[in-house]
Image (cartoon, rainbow, N blue to C red):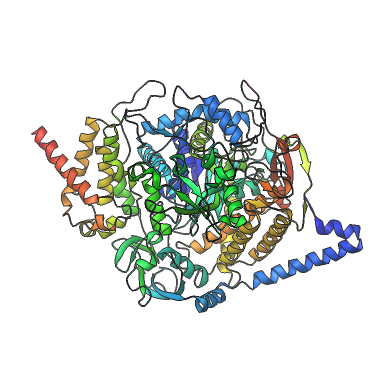
Amino acid sequence: MSTEVKEKETEQTETESVESSHQSRRMEQKRQRASQRDLEEEAREEIDDADETIEIKVFRFDPEVAGKEEPRFDTFHVPFFKGMTVLDALIYARDHYDSSLTFRHSCRQAICGSDALFVNGTQCLGCKTQIADLEGHLNSTIRIEPLPHQEVVKDLVVDMEHFYDQMEAVEPFFDADELPDGELEEQRQDRENREKIKMSTRCIWCGACMSSCNIAAGDNEYLGPAAINKAYRFAMDEREGENRKQQRLNIIEQEHGVWRCQTQFSCTEVCPKDIPLTEHIQELKREAVKNNLKFW
Amino acid sequence: MYEHDVLVIGGGGAGLRAAIAAHEEGADVAIVTKLHPVRSHTGAAEGGINAALRDADSWEDHAYDTMKGSDFLGDAPAIETFAKNAPDEVINLEHWGMPFSREEDGRVSQRPFGGLSFPRTTYAGAETGHHMLHTMYEQVVKRGIEVYDEWYVSRLAVTDHDDPEDRVCHGCVAYDIKSGEIGGFRATGGVILATGGLGQAFDHTTNAVANTGDGPAMAYRAGVPVEDMEMIQFHPTTLPSTGVLISEGVRGEGGILYNDEGERFMFEDGYANNEGELASRDVVSRAELTEVNEGNGIEDEYVHLDMRHLGEERILDRLENILHLAEDFEGVDGLEEPMPVKPGQHYAMGGIEVDENGETCINGLYAAGECACVSMHGANRLGGNALPELLVFGARAGYHAGGRDLGEARIDTGPSAMSEEEDVQTPVSPGAIDAGDEDIAADGALVEPSEVIDHHVTAEERRVDELLEKEDGVNHAEVRADVQETMTQNVNVFREEDNLKEALEDLRVARERYQDVFVRDPSRTFNTDLIHTIETRNIIDVAEAITLGALAREEFRGAHWRKEHQERKDDEWIKHTMLAWNDGNPTIYYKPVELEGEDKTYEPKERSY
């Protein structure tokens, strides 16, 4: 690859050297413009220009940074725009004021399940929560905290290991008793059965339900709504067969399984994918009872 | 040091499929991923998985549609391998429990998609990717495959031979985001890159924040050529304010595009007289932007996608997720009003050069999925072809690294496959600021695997220390924003020489400024500031590669439109644009497209829909 500037220097015709110096002048201007891009300054200007601004108060904690070992709240002033989400506000604060502000996020569209947070006292996904939908968003501070009942790693990041362990405890994988052996032969599933498991398959493992659950808060071994829902997803899938279903019911029936649920519906209320978690847990209780009657 | 037979870098669709395949071969396989696998962006894929499952369909037709869709820049051996294997992969997923949408008789449903001659797109509602990702992760759990989640791979451990084709990849270096540990990972069988997209090089994209092109950037700097990087797909239906994707499934089910005049412009203005809204994605994106540029856009920005006439029942059955996305991210009720849409960066057809077995020119280094270029999508990917691609080639890479004999590949890789050199005139020099490549040691002395890994671990520790210890400097977010801005302005759907050159200048400035970046957060605990800063360098490298490819290719083919070159030039341009890092002084060359299939030659024809 060759750069045009070099070539022009060797040819040395008048117009081209003019172009060449024009080129370097343009590059110099670009450099200056770029170095002037100061994001904090930009934020000040944007706040002055904005019709409306909001204040977010964010939980901060870092076990190894002086001044952050003790949890505290930092307040950030952010210009408001129509359609702004809690995640947008956090990204703005991080990119303009404090790049150490830490939170998980990836897809920005409520499918990766990374950014479950505790906003104004409710579990929700930051990317799916419109600032405009929060009560009094323009005249009171929005409080953003990590998910309660989980260990905080740093700022808004919680340790998800316990949640993942509970998910894995229900043997969360499809395991048919037998498979069709013809070439390109799929298992048949009727539409009603697919419809029956549809909502349960929407879980994005965000952990909002577990965090909202009083029982899970008091009983660390409780499987929790997400894991039980996962068990439901397989137990109700008719492709798996009766043997496997029995085994699945045995798992969710154990001491820290479905019977712990006291049908408070808090999980169902916070689920960002609208999964009827409590209903699924109740249905599994009924299945377990039926199952036991059959064997007695 | 952590040791496994096979290391898979990335926990999305391609990575999970590769890991399962390597495990089936009996390999000790581990997945190293910067997110937990279920957070991967495969989960955001909506539309479906193409596969010729039924008697009335054939893999040959699927292959032809794919070749035509690629605008004859795809390689026949890759496309045929893909089309033949896709049906088995779909049935495999079904046997793993994937909740596909079903017909009355209980069989897997298929629907029409753009550019397909048969309704062969299998799907699970409008959240196919979510179900596929979770179904495969479940199988990873079942098999007890080890997952290092929230470990960020920042460097490949490759030997330092002069010729990239002599180099060997022995593993990688990864950073444990939670603890700050920098670990060396040794792989005796192979390292498979499955890092996904690079959409963060643009500011209006359907891609996740995590899609920063880490794989292409790392492989490129390690000596693997990147292929057809200019071929970027802009999806025609993304929400204007966020870039959130509205599935092609909406048009597949009968959704209609209207301009501000209420015209069904795809037909009325002659953009695609036969297929209309279901023309290939590049055709529809250009049509929309042409309408907007001619003053027929709504608010001078977007067009309308209307699905109201499909009726509530059908929408709820097949497209329910679209209603939620439109409501949550644009405040629009798709049952009551048309949805605003505009083109957004969606997919990279190009990427790390590999053959049909997933192998790069560096021994022991593989790539699969969006980060790779095999090449089957050529100049334009058909909707519904990305998911089966990551299944077919993820599996092949996994099997091959695990030791299965897949036969000799027909696609040549590495600089030795060059047919022609190119000398592109650039306004500024691209590549490293200081020539010489920090990712490879320079003296040819490093051969022994553990030494190679130790060397790279030490280099990475030094880099992280420097970034953390610097007291002041530039915030990477500023540099990243500059890159995204210039790419979206200058390397978008419509490309002109002057703009491409301007982008190269801007990218050079970004690279210079990046020399001064610092990480403000001093912590070793979950330091996302550090991770994002390292990612931004990858974004600069891939953005530059895209722009160089776009400047080199002086024709209009598929997704690549050039103002100065308004036609497809088959005599000259049925060849891949290859870019080699060359230790910091990038060079461009070409390699021929393979149009010779197993039983037939694919003759380039005019591509009309």
Question: Going 61% across and 61% down the picture, which residue do you hit?
Answer: B485
In front of the other: B114 or B32: B114
Residue A72: percent from left, percent from top: 37, 74
Determine whether, in the image, residue B120 is placed left or right of residue B311: right
Question: Going 68% across and 52% down the picture, which residue do you hit?
Answer: B495
Q: How many labels does the image show?
A: 0
Question: Going 28% across and 38% down the picture, which residue do you hit?
Answer: A234
Residue A32: percent from left, percent from top: 69, 72
Q: Hey, which quadrant is residue B488 in on the image?
A: bottom right
Above or below B27: residue B282: below
Residue B410: percent from left, percent from top: 64, 28
Residue that extends furthest to the left in the rendered view of this protein: A296
Residue B12: percent from left, percent from top: 46, 44
Residue that extends furthest to the bottom in the rendered view of this protein: A48
Question: Going 46% across and 73% down the picture, which residue do you hit?
Answer: A78
In front of the other: B357 or B5: B357
Q: Can residue A254 be seen in this view?
A: no
Q: Can residue A226 be seen in this view?
A: yes
